[in-house]
Image: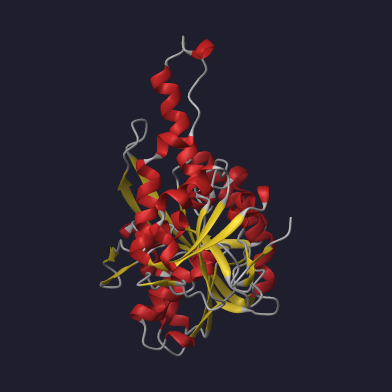
Amino acid sequence: MTSFYSINNIGELYVPAECRDAVFARARAKLFLHQELGHLNRIFTHIRHGGVAIVEGKWEQITALMDYIQRHKRELIQYPQREDRTRDRRTSRGKSVNDALREALARLMCWADADGILQAENAPVLPYLLELAGEPADANQGKPFLLSLTKIQHIQHALRDTYPIRALDTSLIASENVLAPRSQETIECFQEALQHVCRSSPTAVADIGCGSGCLTLLARQELGEQVELYASDLLPEAVATTKLNLQRLSPDSDAVHVMPAGDLFDPFPSHQFDVIIFNAPWVVTRVRNRAELAIHDEKQATVKRFFAEVSTFLKPNGVILLGYADASGPKAIANLETIIADAGFKKETLFKRRVATHRSKRKWEQIRVYVLGRT
């Protein structure tokens, strides 16, 4: 499927992956400008008939249009025919209305210029907008792009929340799909591990799977400004979140190299590090959505790939700081330690915390950060 769509008065627009079904299904995308935003019913009718509405004007008018669609959501569906009335119509209609509303709102879109500035008056300022939407930074090839209003609001709402970090004496933000740094115990274990490796005066450090950038900032704090620090993540939205937190909290944020999004070591074709930080996914089950990529690891496949590749990127006397939890039980820990040994590494020391859980079958789990060296 193509990823660009042309609109009169704008030109060619990049269409992110999650918008393509809506935009290209019937190729009925229409631009509604400024004064046209006052005709709510006209735009609603276009969306109800399967069209995509691209809007430009005052942000207040755009959000009012979204409210209008929500208020008229029952007009989006056809009610069951007479032969279907023996079913529980209330449940059936409720589900149909919600599905229809979700699909309709996905067809209400704004556009941003090539620099990610939303083309709406008084719109929220969201740096790295394309990445926050889950797209690589250069995916739009220097052209304007589309986003659904729903996606923009999800990003906006996610960035409003802050997460206090005792070890950093500050708070961080975490965008949609990015693991929020809620576990103070995990962060403190990594803090102890970083203080331990600081004695060897590392000069090059990588945070693989940087997420919100919490451990990147922690490494900066504990290892000092002289360390050359790199951060990477599979998710573009995590890369963007790390950059945002660095800019908010680190006056010399340009000294940290935040790499383009990529899987594990893909962003590092020829680097070697004294310390590699990896807070690995610790729940041994399948991933159902993007938000679970940082947590779930079916058959520990991600951990296996990490250890299959890490030796190439670690200096001869380098160490790995590996975060893990025993949430999936002792068998998962035993498997992990076998993977570590088979890759040619050994445990130099271990920092751990016992934390309460909210699960009925297991009230406690152990947070672990391994310091691993070569055997």
Residue 298: x and y in percent read: 60, 43
Residue 106 visible to the viewer: yes
Q: Residue furthest right?
A: 1
**Picture quadrant of residue 163:** bottom left
How many labels, in total? 0
Q: Is residue 78 above or below residue 222?
A: above
Q: Is residue 205 above or below residue 152?
A: below
Residue at 44% over, 54% down:
150
Position of 51 with respect to 349 (left or right) is right
Quarter of the image containing the C terminus? bottom right
Nearer the observer, 316 or 310: 310
Nearer the observer, 154 or 345: 154
Residue at 40% over, 85% down:
224
Q: How is the image coloured?
A: secondary structure
Residue 353: x and y in percent read: 34, 54
Residue 266: x and y in percent read: 67, 69
Quarter of the image containing the N terminus? bottom right
